[in-house]
Amino acid sequence: MPYRVSVYAREDLDRIFVYWAKRVSVETADRLIDRITDHFWLLREYPQAGKLCVDIDPGVRSFPAGKYIIYYRTSRRSTEILHVFHGARDQSIALKE
């Protein structure tokens, strides 16, 4: 089963990269993005691994990746990565933005 990264998740990853590249280094930001995206294959292989988020939308799940949370949805054909947010952020506000 393949996985797909939504436009929103790509934008989230870009923001995370820029944030850490400016504050620490490009290398650190690059390693962080790699660590987050390494979880995508896990979610593809084990789509039920995450916690259901019925308060967000039926079928949406969340899974931690260090201090970040990956939101995703699965279907019979694929896993779609919806968003990636820092865990300290108010998730309900982040999802509305």
Image: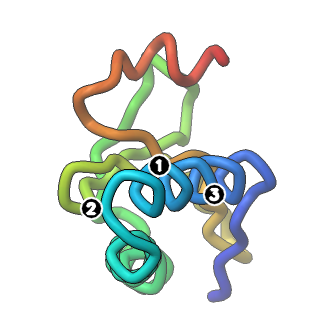
Name the image colouring. Answer: rainbow
Residue 29: % across, % down: 41, 70
Give the quarter of the figure containing the N terminus.
bottom right
Question: From the viewer's perspective, is 43 left or right of 6?
Answer: left
Residue 24: % across, % down: 31, 62
Q: Which of the two discs, 3 and 1, sits closer to the camera? A: 1
- Kindly identify which numbered label has been placed on residue 65: 2
Cα gap from disc 3 to disc 1, whole angstroms: 9 Å
Residue depicted at x 51% and y 61%: 17
| Contact? badges 2 and 3 (CB < 8 Å) | no
Residue depicted at x 28% and y 64%: 49
Pick whichever of labels 1 and 2 is earlier in the sequence.
1
Pick whichever of labels 2 and 3 is earlier in the sequence.
3
At label 1, which amino acid type do we have?
Tyr
Q: Is residue 58 above or below residue 96?
A: below
Q: Is residue 91 above or below residue 60?
A: above
Residue depicted at x 57% and y 46%: 83
The local secondary structure at tag 2 comes to strand
Quadrant position of residue 32: bottom left
The local secondary structure at tag 1 comes to helix
Q: Is residue 74 above or below residue 88?
A: below
- Kindly identify which numbered label has been placed on residue 14: 3
Cα gap from disc 1 to disc 2, whole angstroms: 17 Å
At label 3, which amino acid type do we have?
Asp
Residue closest to the eye, 82 or 57? 82
Circle 1 is placed at which residue position?
19
At label 2, which amino acid type do we have?
Ala
Cα gap from disc 2 to disc 3, whole angstroms: 16 Å
Q: Which of the two discs, 2 and 3, sits closer to the camera? A: 3
Residue 43: % across, % down: 42, 73
The local secondary structure at tag 3 comes to helix
